[in-house]
Amino acid sequence: MRKRLIILATIYLVAFPSAGTTLERMSLARLTHSAQWVVRARCRDNNSDELAPAGSAGIWTVTDFDVEESWKGQPSSHVQVRLPGGRAGHAIRLVLGAPRFHAGEEVVLFLERTHTGNWSITAWGEGTFRIRYNSKDEEIATPDIASGDSSKANSKNNAADSIKAMPVAELRAQVRQAALSSGDLR
């Protein structure tokens, strides 16, 4: 049975390859300016299906988040994020750079509306910060740029090189300062 699933997944990936996606590296200030909302949230659940937004094909994953804190914008207490890729039945669609989330996980998300009216994450992995606790039980926000193309992540003079893991309070302050300086804090 396992061998059959692997063969089916391989056939699907060959028959329905993902379109290539290139995402520009962004500074924290540019991420903040590009996003309509910046939120601290907790993943509630996610589901994948083959019901794609109009004009696109393939498998998409919808993740439900409970908004715990808004750093920019005025989001509702719940937001659904739609990203390409996922698993529907025996079919798997992998999309490099599209973050995946687990129930209970705490994150900071830079969110923007798509042309289809759904919410997505600005620059995908760059607009995703995972909240972890260090050995001193301090909250640390770690950028998820590792989920992107590693050849770009290692390039020199990269704007994202300045985005490093930092205490959540420091990330919040930098986001709010960037939003204020661009007149974008709502």
Image (cartoon, helix red, strand yellow):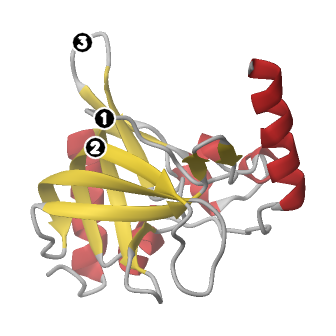
**Three-letter code, disc 3:** Lys
**Three-letter code, disc 1:** Ala
Q: Earlier in the sequence, mark 2 or mark 3?
A: 2
Q: In the picture, residue 60 is in which quadrant?
A: bottom right
Q: Earlier in the sequence, mark 1 or mark 3?
A: 1
In the rendered image, the vertical position of residue 99 relative to residue 140, given as above or below: below
Task: Give the Cα separation between the discs numbered 2 and 3.
Answer: 24 Å
The reply to whether callout 2 and callout 3 are in contact (CB within 8 Å) is no
In the rendered image, the vertical position of residue 96 relative to residue 10, given as above or below: below
Query: Residue visible at 17% across and 51% down?
Result: 66
Question: Quick one: label 3, few (<14), some, or many (20+) residues within 10 Å?
Answer: few
Pick the residue in front: 62 or 65.
Answer: 62
Q: Earlier in the sequence, mark 2 or mark 1?
A: 2
The reply to whether callout 2 and callout 1 are in contact (CB within 8 Å) is yes
User: Viewer-nearest of labels 2 and 3?
Assistant: 2
Query: Residue visible at 45% across and 87% down?
Result: 116
- Numbered disc 1: secondary structure: loop
Q: Which residue is mark 3?
A: 136
Q: Which residue is mark 2?
A: 43
The image quadrant where one finds the N terminus is: top right
Q: Is residue 100 left or right of residue 40?
A: right
Image position, residue 49 (x, y; %) = 51, 57
